Amino acid sequence: MRCPYCKHERSRVVDTLHDLRGGVRRRRECEECGQRFSTYERAILATPLIIKQDGTREEFDRDKLIRGIRISCAKRPVSAADIERLVGEIEATLQAMGRAEVSSRVVGDMVIAGLKELDHIAYVRYAIVYLGLDDLRSIREEIDRLLEG
């Protein structure tokens, strides 16, 4: 593994951690400059194509999903690790389905469910766009449902 600081080719592994999704986090130390850095390894499994509402298909894009969730969670007490975990769970669920194609609605529903558990304000922000809550009455009804449950 090339050092991100000095670009030296050799580093040694200081520590290895395995996560629940099958990924491996390695703490490394450069043999040249002594700087420490982390690498993360995860298996690349096939994810299904996402069928959008207009009928077009696109590859599942983990970064795009993270960006959308981060926008909903802006200025909220939701850590980057929580967002990564949610996206990892969604990606793992899609891979476990074993299907070639999945509706974007399935992905959206998983995001909605995850945000509902993480942060109610982030959930409402995402729901306004995803569920098409286009007036104050529909937004209030959704908030009332949250408060009841």
Image (spheres, helix red, strand yellow):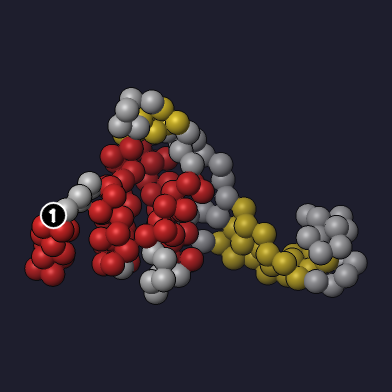
**Quick check: 145 left or right of 48?**
left
Q: Closer to the camera, 37 or 24? A: 37
Residue positioned most to the front: 135
Q: Residue at the spot x=47%, y=59% of the render?
A: 84
Q: Residue at the spot x=39%, y=74% of the render?
A: 77
The reply to whether residue 139 is in sight is yes
**Quick check: 114 left or right of 67?**
left
Packing grade of label 1 (10 A; few <14, some 14-19, many >=20) is some
Q: Dividing the picture into quarters, in which one does residue 57 lie?
A: top left
**Quick check: 122 left or right of 79?**
left
Under circle 1, the secondary element is helix
- Image: 77 above or below 109: below
Looking at the rendered image, the quarter that the N terminus falls into is bottom right
Residue 106: x %, y % from top left = 29, 41
Residue 15: x %, y % from top left = 68, 69
The reply to whether residue 85 is in sight is no
Q: Residue at the spot x=38%, y=71% of the render?
A: 76
Q: Dividing the picture into quarters, in which one does residue 9 lie?
A: bottom right
Q: Amino acid at mark 1?
A: Ser
**Quick check: 13 left or right of 68?**
right
For label 1, the residue is 138
Q: Residue at the spot x=68%, y=64% of the render?
A: 38
Q: Closer to the camera, 44 or 84? A: 84
Q: Dividing the picture into quarters, in which one does residue 4 lie?
A: bottom right
Residue positioned most to the top: 55
